[in-house]
Image: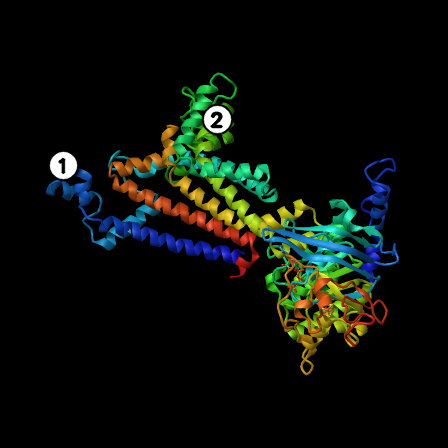
Amino acid sequence: MLTFIAQRVALSFLVLIGVVFVVFAVARILPGDPCVAALQERANPETCADFNARFGLDEPLPVQFGIFVSDLIHGDLGESIRYGRPISEMLIERMPVTIELTLLAMLWATTVGITLGVISATRRNSATDVGTMIGANIGVSTPVFVLGLLLIYLFAIVLKDTPFALPPGGRLTSGLVIVPLATSWGLEDLAGIPRVVIDFISNMYLVNSLITGQWEIFGDAFVHLLLPALALGTIPLALIARMTRSSLLEVLGLDYIRTARAKGLANRAVVMRHGLRNAILPVVTVVGLSLGALLSGAVLTETVFGLTGLGKTITDAILGRDYPVIQALTLITAMIYLVINLLVDISYAFLDPRIRVQ
Amino acid sequence: MTLSEESAQAPSVVVEDLPDSVEVATEEGRRMAAQLHDKQPHAKRLLEVRNLTTQFFTREGVVHAVDEVSFDLDYGETLGLVGESGCGKSVTALSLVRLVPSPPGRIVSGQIIFDGVDILKLSNAEMRLMRGKKIGFIFQDPMTSLNPTLPIGFQISESAKLHLNLSRRAADDRAVELLSKVGIPRARDRMKDYPHQFSGGMRQRVMIAIALACDPMLLLADEPTTALDVTIQAQILDLIRSLSEEFGTAVILITHDLGIAAGMCHRVNVMYAGRIAETGLVDDVFEHARHPYSWGLMDSLPRLTDARSARLRTIEGLPPDLLDPGPECRFSPRCHYVTDRCRTAEPELSSREGEGHLARCFGTEPGGWIA
Ligand SMILES: Nc1ncnc2c1ncn2[C@@H]1O[C@H](COP(=O)(O)OP(=O)(O)OP(=O)(O)O)[C@@H](O)[C@H]1O
Ligand code: SF4
Ligand SMILES: [Mg+2]
């Protein structure tokens, strides 16, 4: 098992190097002068010479690649043309929302989706089954922003002034301020990578408030995430429920399930111990893919709920031709998928012993 | 012989926890439950099957898979079920443990008395106490009948934990013992291995260990060697025979292979189209068969080659349609001896020479036209 994991990690690392190379190459191969693209009408031979010197574009390509890689290793993703700020700084600010939102959405999508899938498969053609599958089909085909607006309408307008009211957007009720970890822990002088990590975690409000015991903030941040997570998790939930159902139904028809029943096991043990463990593999894939999709930017959800996360960053960057940002986000997205694939592979090996030996 | 001793001492599961006043258990239910614990015979015969009828309700119509089948089995006896593919052997065995896939299958009528217990009247929970504990099952394909994601040690000890109330450790010890009994070398080291780490023959040995984990009174072996190659077949059959003798387990052995049935069984049921065509002691059925279908089976057995590898697929004509059996003898479309009488009525099983020797054929009845 350990060798398997080591192999996969090594492989992912190789792929990562490939990705870095491709991202670098694509940025140089793309037609158009980066200087013109960046400076627009201000571009002339003089400003461009300055520009190229500043960004190292006057160096030979291999040297440029070396600089690119060494910058990456030092956490330097370049600078946003549009905002004139280091991209890493923007990411520290914006990625944590996306991560929290995604994890919450996937938490509910996975638990509820698998449960519904199992119930549907074991009570095939029952009211629960039919209801779940109709719901799942509607869920898959409802655009997130429609669902988001409906939820806002219901929880923030119709149920306003009731205990069920939920905030329609933002991260915290205005007036509330979360204390950064660096301040709480008196580490304001910290710099470099540790500082980046701490600031990153600081901006995951749930985590920050949890470890520092800022309960009011925790509750408020959680409540603010509920509606977007609900909206964002619906499509994955429907996909997971459908996949669980079909995969479990298939497994429950297999010979070894009959063996399990012939042992006198109760239905529950047959389904959970012998069925679900084998049926869960394709579900893990769906969870992984959804996780990747949500992490690399839930554009519509963020827009509807007024959150500034990766999704908004990406749209802004594309609309504003902010090439360095696009390049950095491409890298980040690729890394997210690499890590998730790695986790999916490892959980496959964990769940299915036949995969471990290969 | 520690296996049966252990199970005889196994703590009781149900009855003793029930106060007498509790209404849930009927008198019969209580008696049934009491019997689930020990291996003493409670009836004259281990198994009495009467008019068992199992059907599949499919889109195309009702499949009469098992039709009014009756037979008996003594304690410790080995019975063969032989017949062409699709004649209802597996469905018969599955009916005995109420594992007919449902939907579309259902036991429509009949009676199954196992060790004095009316199987078809048990609640689902009571039935689960029978499966695995009193009746073990070995399936045809050892490659697919074991769970690929659980260690075989777990799969063997699972039913011992469940039915014998053994602790994890005791159940593991028992699994190790069973594994070495079924001839798996270095049993303790292999407990944590997964099915894919075993060959087909070894997996079938594991299956046998699972089936015998609680020292059942009856072992249902549905073509246990069909998927294995010939040399392994003989080893597995020897193993089933020696273990069933050692533990006094009765066996119902389903097979395509007459040579196997002749070598392993006390009695055989020859099945055709969901019905028993002929039944009797092995010698009577093999030496003095009284049904044209049985003769057909014997003819299809190549005399000069290894009898063990003979398959019953070479009788002329198509197997019958189980969707809509008419009023005629079911074998009549393929029978060389058919007369008009056979086309208007179906013969009953009736006695022939030999103990419990019955055949379903007008032609071989006393005064019939077949000598
Ligand atoms: N799940 C099912 N749905 C519909 N019909 C079924 C089902 N299972 C079995 N049958 C029918 O029941 C009949 C008896 O099947 P069974 O499996 O008992 O045959 P068998 O004698 O065991 O044959 P084989 O030697 O091929 O295993 C067959 O005609 C089959 O088509
Ligand atoms: S009853 Fe007639 S058709 Fe049927 S087996 Fe006997 S001789 Fe053949
Ligand atoms: Mg069969």
Say which amino acid is labelled 2: Val
- In the rendered structure, the answer to whether residue A247 lies left or right of residue B37 reads left
Mark 2 burial class by Cα count in 10 Å: few <14, some 14-19, many 20+: some
Residue ID at (70%, 73%): B297
Which label's residue is closer to the chain start, 2 or 1?
A: 1
- Name the colouring of the figure: rainbow
Q: Secondary structure at mark 2?
A: helix
Tag 2 and tag 1 share a subunit: yes
Say which amino acid is labelled 1: Arg
Q: Quadrant of the C terminus of chain B?
A: bottom right
- In the rendered structure, the answer to whether residue A7 lies left or right of residue A50 reads right
**Nearer to the camera, A132 or A235:** A132
Q: Chain of mark 1?
A: A
- In the rendered structure, the answer to whether residue A37 lies left or right of residue A261 reads left
- Judging by the rendered image, the residue that carries numbered circle 2 is A223
Q: For residue B47, which quarter of the picture?
A: bottom right
- Judging by the rendered image, the residue that carries numbered circle 1 is A42
Can you give x and y, in whole percent of width and height, for residue A114 in the image? 55, 41
Q: Quadrant of the N terminus of chain B?
A: bottom right
- Above or below, B365 against A32 in this view is below
Q: Secondary structure at mark 1?
A: helix
Q: Chain of mark 2?
A: A
Q: For residue A327, which quarter of the picture?
A: top left
- Above or below, A212 against B296 in this view is above
Number of numbered tags placed on the structure image: 2
